[in-house]
Image: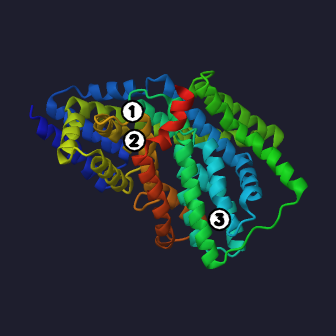
Amino acid sequence: MDTSIATGILLGSFIVLILIKVPITFSMILSTALTLIYIGSPVMTLVQQMAKQLNSFSFLAIPFFILMGEIMSVGGIATRLFQFANILVGRFTGGLAHVNVLASTFFGGISGSTIADVSSLGPLEFRMMEEAGYDKDFSIALTVSSSVQSLIIPPSHNIVLYSMAAGGVSIGSLFIAGYIPGALLAISLMAYCFIVSHKRKYPKSGKVPFKEAMKVTKESLLSLFSMVIVIVGVSAGWFTATESAAIACIYCLFISLVVYREMTIKDIPRVLGGTVKTLAMVYALIAAAGAFGWTMSYLNIPSSATKLILSVSDNPIIILLLINILLLALGTIMDLAPLVLIMTPILLPVVKSFGMSPIHFGIMMMLNLGIGLCTPPVGTALFTGCAIGKRSIESVSKALLPMYVPMIVVLLLVTYIPTITMFLPTLLMS
């Protein structure tokens, strides 16, 4: 068996299948099967590795996080978080732009999903900002870019995927590590909004009456408590990630049905249907990536890639810059989850070789690939925002261009200043 030919078959067929627009899951399965046939390994190995990849207790957290996001989308939680953000920052110049960013921070800290963020908050944000005189393309672009926080502010099922791909890195530590980078991203986007709002003379929001403000605050804090259940429970060791996600789901269901009463029993089949649909895609992807990753390991591709990258330079600054450029480029043509599952085994040994923590690298990767979700041609958050706002991808992408500056600045800060990511995990999880 010629390893170089087998590697060429695996990667070459995968790239060709992606280019001809075969779904990513089937691309990984077919390229793995072709490689196994060439090396003379039973194709049953493919099935075994796919099944083995899903045989992990930690993956049980994923359906609960997805279900929690679905409940929030239907149960009125998104609206109340938007109203709460308006009370906090709506009085500043460009108030609704700041509200947009802060609402995404709150919602992302509960749902962990960029798509749920854009699809739940988007319709309300687009309508209110347009009525207040904001440019519609600007509103959509801001909603899309601020949704990136959903990936790094816990809880996030993609962080669970990274934890498994990285060999079982502490999910609690990864959750806590995302807070400061998430706050930095929010502040940088709000600073950009402040500058643009002054230039374009966007208005402030009206003052909210005190009684209404107290009511909204009370209801919003009930929603935000679900985030506390997950983070405090996991960090303190009271629950596993799976147990905390399950408890938070029950809590969100209770406040949506009983407290807010914007969700009814009749909505439950629709919520469960949306969860199962998303979960089927995620689990199929995890299984396919498991077989694909096993084949890469069998062919020593990760170690070869490590040697190749380290041969370019022995300077960690240069290597991290190259890794960021690579991930940014891949993020524009592939979705986040498969990239996490494929690239983590390849790149993690590289960064560990010069002492970078897997927790630090995980947050850097999530932020990096999150930017890809805002970028064509495969920017799912961008496509969702354009579909809801009924605007062309070209016009929204043009409005989005200046927003890449604060996002990339934060990415570089997170990459090169480990304390930003590691301060809270070191303080709280030591």
Element carrying mark 2: helix
Q: Earlier in the sequence, mark 2 or mark 1?
A: 1
Distance (Cα) linking label 3 and label 1: 36 Å
In three-dimensional space, the C-alpha distance between marks 2 and 1, rounded to whole angstroms, equals 7 Å
* Residue depicted at x 62% and y 53%: 104
Q: Quadrant of residue 352?
A: top left
Q: Position of residue 114 (x, y in %)?
A: 55, 50
Q: Is residue 262 left or right of residue 61?
A: right
Q: Which residue is mark 1?
A: 165
Colour scheme of this structure image? rainbow
Q: Which residue is mark 2?
A: 340
What amino acid type is highlighted by mark number 1?
Answer: Ala
Contact check, label 3 and label 2, Cβ < 8 Å? no
The amino acid type, in three-letter code, at marker 2 is Val
Q: Is residue 374 left or right of residue 327?
A: right
Q: Position of residue 423 (x, y in %)?
A: 51, 37
Mark 3 Cα shell of 10 Å, populated few (<14), some (14-19), many (≥20): many
Task: Estimate the x, y position of residue 51 in percent, counting from the top left.
Answer: 39, 26
Q: Which secondary structure, mark 1?
A: helix
For marks 3 and 2, give the CA distance. Answer: 31 Å
- Report the number of numbered marks: 3
Residue 408's disc is none
Q: Name the foreground residue: 418 vs 274.
A: 418
Asked if residue 281 can be seen in this view, the reply is no
Whether tag 2 and tag 1 are in contact, CB under 8 A, the answer is yes
Q: Residue furthest bottom?
A: 200
The residue beneath circle 3 is 97
